[in-house]
Image: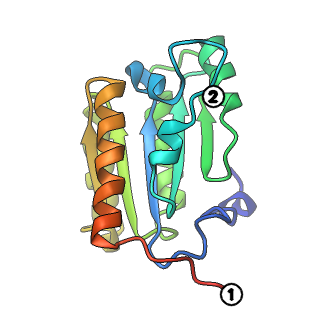
C-alpha cells in the first residue's frame, strides 16, 4: 500500500458519514466462509449488506487456497477492501497485513473493530496500537468468534444496535 492508497480510505460510500467504522477481519481459520455461501459458485452478499452503511470492511486472507481467492475476488463492493497474503502460506501473513493496514489508517475512522478467530497476536497488536496511538484507547475493539455463524450473528446485532441507538447518522452532503 502506498501513500496515495491511504487517501482511498474511508471509501466514498463511507467518507461523508460523521461516524466512520473500520471492520478488520482475519478470514483465516474459517471466518472467511461467512462471506460466501456453501454453494461454491454464488457469492452471498447478505453478510456484507448487514454491516452498517457507515463502515468499511477490510478482509485479510491467505492466498494459498485458490477457491478462497476466487470467492474473495467476486466480492465487489465499494466498502470492501481485500488483502491477500503476498507470500502464499505465510503463517502470520494475515496478522501482519492487518497490523500494517491498521497502523496506516489509524486516524481515518472513529472506531476500529478487529475480528479474528483465536489468534493471541491480535491482543498484542491492539495494545501496541493503543500505546503508540493514545487516541485509539477507547476506539479499538477486539472480537473473537469460533465460526462464521457467530460472526454473522454479531454483525446483525451490531447493525441493529447502531440503528436503534441512532449511532449511524445520515451522510453529510458536501
Q: Position of residue 86 (x, y in %)?
A: 65, 28
Q: Residue at x 31, y 40 (%)?
A: 122
Q: Residues within 10 Å of mark 2 (few under 14, many from 20)?
A: many
Q: Residue at x 36, y 55 (%)?
A: 159
Q: Residues within 10 Å of mark 1 (few under 14, many from 20)?
A: few
Q: Residue furthest bottom?
A: 174
Residue 51 is left or right of residue 4, and the answer is left
* Element carrying mark 1: loop
Please tell me in which quadrant of the rendered image residue 8 appears.
bottom right
Q: Nearer the viewer, residue 10 or 54?
A: 54
Mark 2 against mark 1, which lies toward the viewer? Answer: 1
**Marks 2 and 1: CB-CB under 8 Å?**
no
Q: Position of residue 120 (x, y in %)?
A: 25, 33
Q: Nearer the viewer, residue 69 or 103?
A: 69
Disc 2 target residue: 72
Count of numbered labels shown in the rendering: 2
Q: Residue at x 30, y 37 (%)?
A: 153
Where does the C terminus fall, quadrant-wise?
bottom right
Please tell me in which quadrant of the rendered image residue 43 appears.
top right
Q: Residue at x 50, y 64 (%)?
A: 54
Residue 153 is left or right of residue 63, and the answer is left
* Element carrying mark 2: helix
First in residue order: circle 2 vs circle 1: 2
Taking 166 as reference, is 44 above or below it?
above
Q: Position of residue 98 (x, y in %)?
A: 48, 43
Disc 1 target residue: 174
Residue 83 is left or right of residue 133, and the answer is right
Q: Say the numbered circle drawn on residue 154.
A: none
Taking 91 as reference, is 156 above or below it?
below
Amino acid at each position: 500500500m502506498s501513500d496515495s492508497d491511504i487517501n482511498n480510505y474511508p471509501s466514498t460510500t463511507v467518507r461523508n458519514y460523521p461516524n466512520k467504522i473500520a471492520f478488520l477481519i482475519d478470514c483465516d481459520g474459517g471466518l472467511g466462509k461467512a462471506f460466501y455461501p456453501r454453494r461454491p459458485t454464488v457469492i452471498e452478499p447478505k453478510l456484507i449488506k448487514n454491516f452498517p452503511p457507515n463502515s468499511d470492511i477490510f478482509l485479510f486472507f491467505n492466498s494459498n487456497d485458490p477457491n478462497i481467492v476466487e470467492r474473495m475476488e467476486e466480492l465487489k463492493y465499494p466498502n470492501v477492501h481485500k488483502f491477500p497474503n503476498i507470500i502464499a502460506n505465510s503463517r502470520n501473513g494475515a496478522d501482519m497485513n492487518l497490523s500494517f493496514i491498521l497502523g496506516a489508517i489509524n486516524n481515518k475512522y472513529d472506531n476500529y473493530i478487529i475480528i479474528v478467530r483465536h489468534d493471541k497476536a491480535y491482543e498484542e497488536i491492539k495494545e501496541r496500537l493503543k500505546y503508540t496511538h493514545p487516541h485509539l484507547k477507547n476506539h479499538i475493539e477486539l472480537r473473537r468468534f469460533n465460526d462464521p455463524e457467530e460472526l454473522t450473528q454479531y454483525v446483525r446485532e451490531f447493525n441493529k444496535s447502531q440503528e436503534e441507538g441512532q449511532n449511524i447518522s445520515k451522510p453529510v452532503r458536501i
